[in-house]
Image: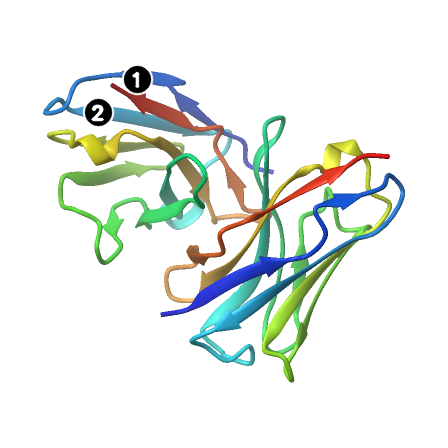
Amino acid sequence: ETVLTQSPATLSLSPGETATLSCGASQRVSNNYVAWFQQKPGLAPRLLMYDASSRVSGTPDRFSGRGSGTDFTLTISRLEPEDFAVYYCQQYGSSPWTFGQGTKVEI
Amino acid sequence: QVQLQESGPGLVKPSQTLSLTCSVSGESITSDYYYWTWIRQSAGKGLEWIGRFYSTGTTNYNPSLKSRVTISIDTSKNHFSLRLTSVTAADSAVYYCATEDLQMSTFNYWGQGTLVAVSP
């Protein structure tokens, strides 16, 4: 199975700053089938991005995704208070679908 | 807008069978637009895809759980179910039902999750 490794584990930033989250895959992810989710305490994950760089309807444009092959990045520009959460990458290029272990973006 | 709601016992004894149901509203369970999916989250293993059911009857399971998992649907109740046999403490987790959108190929709607503990 494809193992996803996210870094860093924790990112300590202030509102207004930029967060750069990395997701590395143990093998090439076909068609760049990578999604990003945001999770807040006590809630289910929420889909933000799919196909590495496509925003889901309702995702603010300060969120951007890029990458190909085995290296993917989620960038959050101009952090807002509501952006402080845990972020997970997920691949759906090869079964079984797998998730990274998460990056916590904290104030 | 699809809405999902998990239900089932919060405590299961080791070696027994975990059974959960996901009630679906806003979409027919026979829809061609979604795979009906179960995902779990634990402190030890993080988020783990369990498996999915499609309207044609096709199921796909995580190989790590395949021998113990069954996902099925009930069209009369518009819900789908998860059955996990021979549970151990390692199966303790928050269980989510979700939809895998055929166009985006990932999980766009989620239930709120239900905590299941495996303990004597």
* Residue found 33% across the figure and 26% down from its top: A22
Q: Nearer the viewer, residue A70 or B77?
A: B77
Q: Earlier in the sequence, mark 2 or mark 1?
A: 1
* Residue found 24% across the figure and 25% down from its top: A20
Tag 1 residue: A11
Numbered disc 2: what chain? A
* Residue found 16% across the figure and 29% down from its top: A79
Horizontally, residue B53 falls left or right of residue B70, namely left
Q: Nearer the viewer, residue B62 or B82?
A: B82
Q: Give the crowd class for mark 2: few <14, some 14-19, many >=20 residues within 10 Å.
A: many
Q: Is residue B33 above or below residue A85?
A: below
Q: Secondary structure at mark 1?
A: strand
Residues at marks 2 and 1 on the same chain: yes
Residue A19: image tag? 2
Horizontally, residue B91 falls left or right of residue A60, namely right
Q: Is residue A63 above or below residue B108?
A: above
Q: Secondary structure at mark 2?
A: strand
Give the image location of residue B67, x and y in percent.
82, 50
Give the image location of residue A12, x and y in percent.
27, 15
Q: Are marks 2 and 1 in contact (CB under 8 Å)?
A: yes
Kind of residue indicated by mark 1: Leu
Q: Quadrant location of the N terminus of chain A?
A: top right
